[in-house]
Image (cartoon, grey):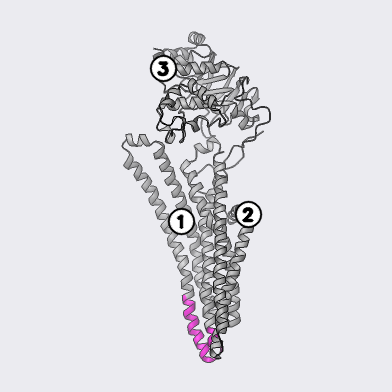
Amino acid sequence: MSSIESGGGAGAPKTARLSAGETWRALYRHFRPHRRIVALGAFLALIGAASGLAQPLATKALVERLGEDGSVTGILLVLTGLVVFGTAIEALASYLLERTAESVVLAARRTLIGRLLRLRLPEVERTQPGDLMSRVTSDTTLLRAVTTQSIVSAGTGGLAFLATIALMGVMDMVLLGVTLGVIVVIGCAVALVMPRISRATRRSQEAVGHISTVLERAFGAFRTVKASGAEEREAAVVEAAAQEAWRHGVRAAKWQSLAGTSVGLAVQVSFLAVLGIGGARVASGAISISTLIAFLLFLFYLMDPVSKLVQAVTQYQVGSAAVARIAEAERLETEVLEPASGGTGTAGRPGARPATVAFEDVTFRYREELPYVHHGVSFEIPGPGMTAFVGPSGAGKTTVFGLIERFYEATGGRVLVDGRDVRDWALPELRATIGYVEQDAPVLAGTLRENLVFAAPDATDERIREVLVRARLNELVERLPDGLETLVGHRGSKLSGGERQRVAIARALLRGPRLLLLDEATSQLDAVNELALRDAVAEAAREVTVLVVAHRLSTVTLADRIVVMDAGKVRAVGTHDELVANDPLYGELAATQFLAAAR
């Protein structure tokens, strides 16, 4: 079965624009689960708009009643009621839409976070993590307005606009013609700036993503930045990215301001034209003074639906850039974490049989444009026992582990675990079988306990104590002020390199794997702790299959078998004594690279 969803996207810094149809489909996907609440909010907004439309009519009746010296108490009560009712209904509609908008953002973030954490490793390696983080934070925030307010504003604003125009037409077609003429002229000018808003917003969001990228780079190597005296240079890089975001943000704000003020300009010009022409029509007796007053009130009321329409289009232009960036992230290739089949998850169980590993003529390269790392790698490893992989830098040793874990897919040949192609395993089942200690032994921010149980959240305190002793961490825990609940800092900054390595080894052992992968797992340990860890690994090798990438002779000589790799091929397999006698490369490595460690 395939465990990879197909998708495009290489995480390029420039975001491809979506067509209008693609943008609307993407928007509707976010909007669809909340369509009933949005419809209710829109309905309430329409009721509020209707109450607003009734106010000029009530005002017209009030003016006519004043001219007849009649009682105006009833009309004033109706007018007051319309104002209060309309305000309350619109406030409720606004709350419903804002609440729904937050729900849209939450759902988008939840989906995007879940997807990003399932990305294939090659996608993460060719995409800037800071840019991906900005899509979860900044871009989803822009999604808020466009998926609710923009859609509702377009609908309610459009209906209110048509209703207002119809009522204005009933009152006087001449004045309506004057009003529409002004609105159309200014509306055409607004339409010309909308694409500029979209472009400026898209570039601003890309620049914000770049800010996150350069900050992530600086904080990821914070000690190196300080030790290199590079604070000012790094600050300059971040400031340049911030300046770029500012430039595009200001440009977008300029066009948005132009679009927004055009509404007020249209109403004011219309008011002056209607006041002049309407006054002449009142003087000629074509219309009454009450009709002119009502028409002017409708004209001012028209500002709200026109503003909503302009705002909706502006928000769409802003949101479409965010939607495109979110959609691009959603197209990145992900792993499908199928549930493990019943009865096969034996990792961590007492007496679970060790795993076997075999490579059959495996070829691999990281991308099509790059050279091959593996050129027909073949070997077979029975379990239990320890197998060491040695060879020059760049020989492809660490890549062996990446292929076993299915961080990468073999370009050719087969990778077998327990005689099954790893592509036929469900990923959770495969990885539950394996304990993996990376070369740089990462430690996550949080407590020491959280790091230890990261791969085995159900581990008991007794099991944790046992592993702490095996990893020689028990004395460290006793010294810490809060024991296992001590915070280890960002990336384990409060621990030494050797302590971080021991934490990573303990984490892998606590998982209770059938296959243990150690990538230079003792490189930062002193001689005493290395000896202790070697004993722990040797003990584990009696029960599970242990594969280790090693550069120290003391580790290699403990192995039951040694696989010598060079230039992406397996050149020899055997014991230390056999390889010293028969393989010149291994003999050279043993005499130079390993020998210093042995002494």
Q: Main secondary structure of the magenta part?
A: helix
Q: Residue furthest right?
A: 342
Residue picked out by circle 3: 528
Q: Nearer the viewer, mark 1 or mark 3?
A: 3
Quadrant (top left, top right, bottom left, bottom right) of the C terminus: top left
Task: Give the class, few, some or many, for how many residues have Cα within 10 Å of label 2's Cα (few <14, many ≥20).
Answer: few
The amino acid type, in three-letter code, at marker 1 is: Ala
Q: How many marks?
A: 3
Pick whichever of labels 2 and 3 is earlier in the sequence: 2
Q: Does 114 sit above or below residue 427?
A: below
Q: Is 49 drawn above or below residue 560 in the view shown? A: below
Whether residue 13 is visible here, answered yes or no, is no
Q: Is residue 291 on the magenta stretch?
A: yes
Q: How far is the residue under mark 2 from the one under mark 3?
A: 62 Å
- Which residue has dot 2 on it? 32
Mark 2 or mark 3, whichever is nearer to me: 3
Q: CA distance from mark 1 to mark 3?
A: 60 Å
Percent across and percent down for residue 227 are 32, 34
Q: Position of residue 392 (x, y in %)?
A: 46, 21
Marked residue nearer the N-terminal end (1 or 2): 2
Residue 262 part of the magenta-drawn span: no
Mark 2 near mark 3, Cβ–Cβ under 8 Å?
Answer: no
Q: Secondary structure at mark 2?
A: helix
Work out whether 532 lies above or below 275. Answer: above
Question: Can you say whether 27 is above or below 516 in the image?
Answer: below
On residue 200, the disc is 1
Q: Position of residue 498 (x, y in %)?
A: 42, 25
Where residue 225 sits: x, y (%)? Answer: 35, 37
State the CA–CA distance, disc 1 to disc 2: 28 Å
Q: What is the magenta range?
A: 268-292
